[in-house]
Amino acid sequence: TEGVVIPFASFKSVLDQPLEPGGPTIFQWMQDQYALIRSLAADPDRQRQASGQFLERMRSRMARAEPGEDFIRSLRAGMEKAFGPDGSTGVFLRSDTNVEDLPGFSGAGLNLTVMNVVGFDRVVEAIRQVWASPFTERAFQWRQSLMEKPEYVYVSILLLKSVPSEKSGVMVTADVESGRPG
């Protein structure tokens, strides 16, 4: 089946933009925030507060990310080639990160997948939502205990044509917290 891939590099290029006009890049700011969060380990309440503020700001910033004219032009051409004229079909945006399948860790299902998005502008908005999804409390908490440098989490997205479906979902065969079967 035809599809369109938005590589990790597209997400990284957004992180290389200024957080605010004249400020550090998003990536530099993230590094500073992660260092701050680590430094508060002796004060869990302040650490939780700092983490929450960081995550909220990152979700907000990524939700309004401007990927650039070249990205938009390339995405539009790729979607038209793979899916036909704008609005003629729905697409499924499947997220992936560079740290989803590590020894002792599976991040499957941590980040957002958006189903049956119709129209180019809605797809661009859904891309922003997917880019913001690694900064939810749940995704952050699962990764934090396993990563020394969490600022190096990058998102890629696979766009596939939606298909009619009566039911879909994920089967869980073990407790997601403990790993125990049943």
Image (spheres, grey):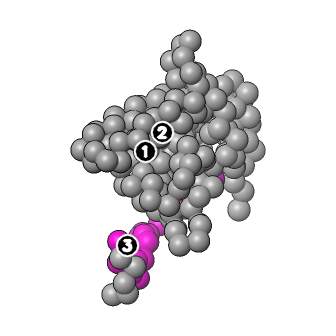
| Label 2: which secondary element | helix
Residue 59 occupies quadrant: top left
Amino acid marked by disc 1: Arg
Which residue is at the front of the view, 159 or 53?
Answer: 53
Sooner in the amino-acid sequence: mark 2 or mark 3: 2
Above or below, 178 against 160 in this view is: below
Above or below, 96 against 170 in this view is: above
In the picture of the structure, the residue carrying the numbered disc 1 is 38
Is the residue under label 1 in contact with that under label 2 (CB below 8 Å)? Answer: yes
Look at discs 3 and 1 and give the one toward the viewer.
Answer: 1
Residue span colored magenta: 157-177
Is the residue under label 3 in contact with that under label 2 (CB below 8 Å)? Answer: no
- For label 1, the crowd category at 10 Å Cα-Cα, with few meaning under 14, some 14 to 19 and many 20 or more, is some
Question: What residue sits 58% from the left and 25% below the top?
Answer: 25
User: Residue placed farthest to the top in the image?
Assistant: 22
Q: Is residue 96 visible?
A: no
Which residue is at the front of the view, 172 or 26?
Answer: 26
- For label 2, the crowd category at 10 Å Cα-Cα, with few meaning under 14, some 14 to 19 and many 20 or more, is few
Question: What residue sits 40% from the left and 31% below the top?
Answer: 57
Left or right of 76? Residue 48 is left
Look at discs 2 and 3 and give the one toward the viewer.
Answer: 2
In the picture of the structure, the residue carrying the numbered disc 2 is 35
Amino acid marked by disc 3: Val
Return the mark for residue 176.
3
Sooner in the amino-acid sequence: mark 3 or mark 1: 1
Picture coordinates of residue 159, whole percent (x, y): 62, 51
| Label 3: which secondary element | loop
Amino acid marked by disc 2: Ala
Is residue 169 found inside the magenta-colored segment of the image? Answer: yes
In which quadrant is the N terminus drawn? bottom right
| Label 1: which secondary element | helix
Which residue is at the front of the view, 36 or 92?
Answer: 36
